[in-house]
Amino acid sequence: MKNIILVITIVVFKVTTVFAQADSLVIDENNKYIYYQVVAQPGSSADSLQARAVYFAKKAFADSKLKFKKSEKGTIRATGGVLVSKKSSIGLHEDARIDYTMVIEVKDNRYRYWFTDFIIVPYARDRYANFVPVSGKNTPLENGLSSLSKKDFDGYTAKLFATVKDIGNRLKTYMKTPVAPVKQEVKKTTIPATNW
């Protein structure tokens, strides 16, 4: 009896752990951080989902947060970044920017999206007391613990996760809303009264 209860407890714990990790930053098969979601959208064709995804990538956010890059058959790519602030004695200041790539793939009745290629771009104070990106010091997020403290790394990943989850939620809203067709301009033809 104790063995059965132990097995059931282990199975429930494993299933709970798998579901808890489904909505977080995880390491993929290439040892890179990734945020990945698959969404069912019954009754939607791939073409309409593609149009909605392109509209989302172009219009949903400012270019600093998400910028449309290209659209191919069934795939949309965008890039963006999130600023991570740090508290100092005076107040908050930019500590780094985490750049990412977003990929959206569409098929009939479903689509998937993921964020990957996370790059930490550190910021430093310049001679005018402004915080600006430091060139040449970019670090992949996977190597972040080697250049950051555990506390800073956890703060970076928490901010990044909140941002990509927000973008994903906004994408889901855009994918449910049909895109208005582009109105084509109708050329007016005039016939002069002298030509008959």
Image (cartoon, grey):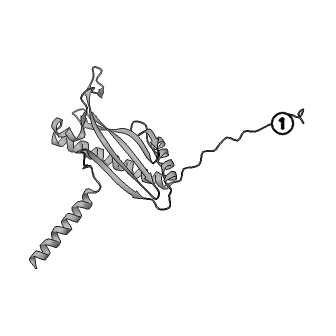
**Residue sticking out furthest to the bottom:** 1
Q: Nearer the viewer, residue 55 or 195?
A: 195
* Horizontal and vertical percent position of residue 70: 45, 39
Q: Quadrant of residue 140?
A: top left
**Residue sticking out furthest to the left:** 2
* Horizontal and vertical percent position of residue 92: 27, 35
In the displayed structure, would residue 113 be above or below residue 127? below
**Which amino acid type is marked by label 1?**
Ile
Mark 1 neighbour density, 10 Å: few (under 14) some (14–19) many (20 or more): few
Which element is circle 1 on? loop
- Tell me the residue at 28%/23% (across/down): 129
* Horizontal and vertical percent position of residue 40: 42, 60
Determine whether, in the image, residue 7 is placed left or right of residue 104. Answer: left
- Tell me the residue at 41%/42% (across/down): 77
Residue topped by disc 1: 191
All told, the count of numbered labels is: 1
Determine whether, in the image, residue 189 is placed left or right of residue 14. Answer: right
- Tell me the residue at 16%/37% (across/down): 146
Q: Nearer the viewer, residue 76 or 24?
A: 76
Image quadrant occupied by the N terminus = bottom left
* Horizontal and vertical percent position of residue 142: 22, 41
In the displayed structure, would residue 128 be above or below residue 61? above
In the displayed structure, would residue 123 be above or below residue 84? above
Image quadrant occupied by the C terminus = top right
**Residue sticking out furthest to the top:** 127
In the displayed structure, would residue 44 be above or below residue 62? below
